Amino acid sequence: MSKTKQQAHTTSQELQSVGLIPSVLPEGFRSTYSINATFGMLNIDCGAEVPLHALDDHSPVYSVLEARDEAYYTFILVDPDSPTPEAPHDRELLLHLVTNVPGKQADSRIGEIVVPYRMPSQNQGQSRGVHRYLLAILEQPQGGQQIVHIARPKYRTNFSIAEYANLYRFKLVGATFFYSSWDEAHAQETNATTAMVRLHDSLKYAKSMLEKANLLKELVLEGSAHFIVPLLLRFNGETVCAGDEVPSAVADTTPVITFDSEKDQSFYTVVIVDADFPSIHQATDRALLLMLTANIPSSEGDSSVGDVIMHYMSPSSFPGGTGLHRYFVLLLEQHGGILEEGAVDIPDRRRGFQLHEFMKAHASLEAVGATFFLGRRKE
């Protein structure tokens, strides 16, 4: 037996010893693959106890050892102890679901995100005790050779790995688990953590990710965008961090951008554009304007209460887009106060919208915050 197979066998025994077999995984399940889970710089071993804050990574990475090159796999991360081990009413709480991971690379970053990662700490105020977190790998149909296109589950709560596998004819081939403690002290600390602290953390992260994605330079905004107002992007109430990939069905819904400005009686504008239309390799229509909302009061800090100038149109509304796209969200402070009707030049077309020219034409607008998300268009 190879070292990897021996590790998988040992994992199966541990899964049974902690009650994940048969409470979550079926009776008689034996792991045949070893899985690695990495959160930031932390590589997590099977059965390890992990500090809760270490799981607050925006893009965990999963990989599988000795996967078959010709096969495709799905990774699923769940919390079977939500909200508490004593009363797990949410079992299983779905935290992450990635499909179509090719065995040749065996890396979740190459797969298709069906459900974006949700940090366990987002359940603040609810969770208590020591939770087990289970990561499973499933081989896709036809011996793993079938690429699948599946609907996003309607709810994260009461998800079932076993039922999911049966529904889509997947084969459960591997699993691992780790612990994290929601002790009372940390729960109180989490509840006391203000949204402002979380927003400032996201501000630094967004700036770093935008620089890596080269978006400011490509949109001719380098040097003119200042990261001083942190913002949050949400689809259907779920936070999307900078660089996260959003499933197309989710991106069809109108996003909400919230922010916390230290200035009283100020107003803001939000712009969302597709920087890569029709494709990232040939963005001849850069940028494609998806949304333009002005006069958002700082007292509200919510794009849904502003004046809609160009209503949100989802990426799928525009035919012809292909491949992976970067969608840029920009927050502009209105230094001249509220913009009266007619003060904003309404673009005559959404394609070819020049963001830097728009800012030049409206000198009272200053870029003070930004983020972006990814979306994949079918080839």
Image (tube, rainbow, N blue to C red):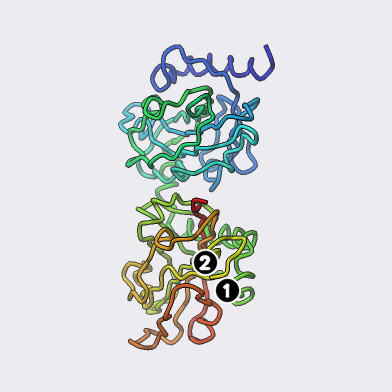
As helix, strand or loop, the secondary structure at mark 1 comes to loop
The label shown at residue 370 is: 2
In x, y percent, where is residue 99?
50, 37
Q: Secondary structure at mark 2?
A: strand
29 relative position to 85: left or right: right
Q: Callout 2, which amino acid?
A: Ala
Label total for image: 2
Q: Quadrant of residue 86?
A: top left
Residue 183: give x, y in percent of width and height: 44, 35
Residue at x-position 58% and y-position 14%: 9
Check the image and report above or below for 318 versus 64: below
In the image, residue 368 above or below residue 23: below
Q: CA distance from mark 2 to mark 1?
A: 8 Å
Q: Which mark is residue 354?
A: none
Task: Reply above or below: 249 against 331.
Answer: above
**Considering only order in the chain, which callout, 1 or 2, is on the residue closer to the N terminus?**
1
At horizontal 40% and vertical 30% (from top left) the residue drawn is 168
Q: Quadrant of the N terminus?
A: top right
Q: Residues within 10 Å of mark 1 (few under 14, many from 20)?
A: some
Residue at 47 percent across and 23 percent down: it is 171
The front one of 43 and 111 is 111
Vertical comparison of 163 with 185: above or below: above
- Nearest the eye: 123 or 193: 123
Q: Are marks 2 and 1 in contact (CB under 8 Å)?
A: yes
Q: Residues within 10 Å of mark 2 (few under 14, many from 20)?
A: many
Q: Nearer the viewer, residue 45 or 75?
A: 75
Residue wearing tag 1? 225
Residue 137 location (% of width, % of height): 52, 28
Q: Residue at x 62, y 27 (%)?
A: 67
The answer to whether residue 268 is left or right of residue 34 is left
The quarter holding residue 309 reads bottom left
Residue type indicated by callout 1 = Ala
